Image: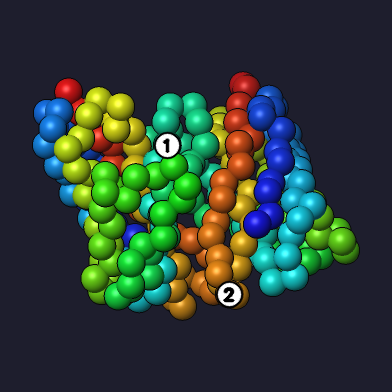
Amino acid sequence: GAVVSQHPSRVICKSGTSVKIECRSLDFQATTMFWYRQFPKQSLMLMATSNEGSKATYEQGVEKDKFLINHASLTLSTLTVTSAHPEDSSFYICSAIGSASGANVLTFGAGSRLTVL
Amino acid sequence: LAKTTQPISMDSYEGQEVNITCSHNNIATNDYITWYQQFPSQGPRFIIQGYKTKVTNEVASLFIPADRKSSTLSLPRVSLSDTAVYYCLVGSTSGTYKYIFGTGTRLKVLA
């Protein structure tokens, strides 16, 4: 079945530094990837949608200069949290959709927990 | 964009059948209905997907009425390990699409 790998699973960084999270579709080509963030006891909030080779589309209220998304290939998308601050601490989850995952099925990564000190 | 509404939480006992209903009044013609399960600190996991009528797989059934404005996920004989948050998601890959999560339903299975 379709598998999405997300790395790192946990990251702790100091305030002001940048952190990169990778999302890879292992056995299918992901035409579109989605990035979500989730706070404790809350639902997933869509941050942005990215298509391979084009700029990401950000949801209202999400700072594009803060959360840089690069979808350079059909199997890799990255989310970089720039100049991270404690309020950016959250659980970030990527998902991908492509032909092997099912035409309308999102396959999710395991998530990355970011803690900013 | 179809917005989904689900009960915030449900309790059940082991061995019982659990039905979770999701309302999606603004569902579009091309939209599919997909249910996911999420455990703490994990990504959501696919359970079942349908477009209309009834779909069944090895873990669940999905009932969708003719007007498609709602759907019901049915989990037969739940166990403690089914304690999780369940989300219904509505969307499609036709045209401009995005997948917005609702509140989800927090299911707690009691012994």
Question: Mark 2 highlights which residue?
Answer: B95
**Is the residue marked by circle 2 packed among few (<14), some (14-19), or many (20+) residues within 10 Å?**
few
Q: Chain of mark 1?
A: A
Q: Position of residue A21 (x, y in %)?
A: 22, 50
**Is the residue marked by circle 1 packed among few (<14), some (14-19), or many (20+) residues within 10 Å?**
some
Q: Are marks 2 and 1 in contact (CB under 8 Å)?
A: no
Residue A107 falls in which quadrant of the image? Answer: bottom left
Q: Relative to the observer, which residue lies in front, A107 or B107?
A: A107
Residue type at mark 2: give it. Gly
Residue appearing at x 22%, y 49% in the figure: A80
**A112 lies above or below A99:** above
Question: Mark 1 highlights which residue?
Answer: A38
Q: Nearer the viewer, mark 2 or mark 1?
A: 2
Q: Position of residue A111 (x, y in %)?
A: 33, 45
Q: How far is the residue under mark 2 from the one under mark 1?
A: 27 Å
Q: Relative to the observer, which residue lies in front, A11 or B72?
A: A11
Residue appearing at x 42%, y 48% in the figure: A47
Q: Chain of mark 2?
A: B
Regarding mark 1 in the picture, which secondary structure is present there? strand
Regarding mark 2 in the picture, which secondary structure is present there? loop
Q: Give the quarter of the figure containing the C terminus of chain B.
A: top right
